[in-house]
Image: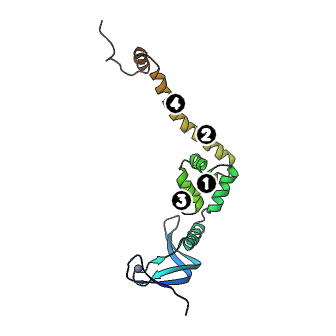
Amino acid sequence: MPRAKSKACAVCGMGNLREITGAFSTQIEGPDGHVMTLSVPDVTWRHCDSCGEDLLDNEESAKVTRAHRAALKLLTAEEIRSIRQRLGKTQAEMGELLGIGEKTYCRWESGTHFQSEAFDRYLRLLEMPEVVDRLNEIRLYKEGLAETAASKFQYIGDLSQYEIASELRRRSSPVSWFAKSA
Ligand SMILES: [Zn+2]
């Protein structure tokens, strides 16, 4: 008889947990939306005989996540890290370049979450230098918009009240409230 550790289930509080080692099966959604069964060999988990819950520790869960990623033909965490290292960027800079924020990017690289099919294709495009150049231009353009707005605001602030009114008129804003009758 295989060695089995027993412990009460934390999910239902009723059943006993039985430790199992073998092929772990789970349902996953394919890129086109159809459901398929993923079978991962050499996994150890605990199964509740009452509610049917399967509990995996972090290490075993990471094994399933890696297999899930591979089944969907997504870049692995290591592959994403090597793309970043080839570009000589920090994780924060990658978040900025891709327009997704550092947190999301870090999750992909640490392997706790994986990228969607669309982001996977986007990441693969980074192998082309011209794509990276274009993304840098886009990033600067977007940052530039914020700077332009700030400098316009500053410019108006330095003007006298009369000059502000003239400036607003020049920008074709209706400023009839300013026109004083003689
Ligand atoms: Zn249970």
Q: From the Cβ of disc 2, is ligand 1 less than 8 Å away?
A: no
Q: Which image quarter has ligand 1?
A: bottom left
Q: Quadrant of residue 144?
A: top right
> For the point 60% across and 63% down, which residue is it?
74
Query: Where residue 78 sits: x, y (%)?
Result: 65, 61
Q: From the Cβ of disc 1, is ligand 1 less than 8 Å away?
A: no
> For the point 47% across and 81% down, which residue is it?
47
Residue with the mark numbered 2: 137
Tag 1–tag 3 contact (CB < 8 Å):
no
Res. 19 mark: none
Name the secondary structure under disc 3: loop
Q: Nearer the viewer, mark 4 or mark 3?
A: 4
Residue with the mark numbered 4: 148
- Per the model, the C-alpha gap separating discs 3 and 2 is 24 Å
Q: For the residue carrying disc 2, how many other residues have a C-alpha within 10 Å: few (<14), some (14-19), or many (20+)?
A: few
Q: Is residue 7 above or below residue 156?
A: below
Q: Is residue 107 above or below residue 26?
A: above
Residue with the mark numbered 1: 123
- Per the model, the C-alpha gap separating discs 4 and 1 is 30 Å
Say which amino acid is labelled 3.
Answer: Ser
Residue with the mark numbered 3: 116
Say which amino acid is labelled 4.
Answer: Thr
Query: Toward the viewer: 44 or 128?
Result: 44
Query: Where residue 24 sits: x, y (%)?
Result: 54, 79
Disc with the residue nearer the chain's start (3 vs 2): 3
Q: For the residue carrying disc 1, how many other residues have a C-alpha within 10 Å: few (<14), some (14-19), or many (20+)?
A: some
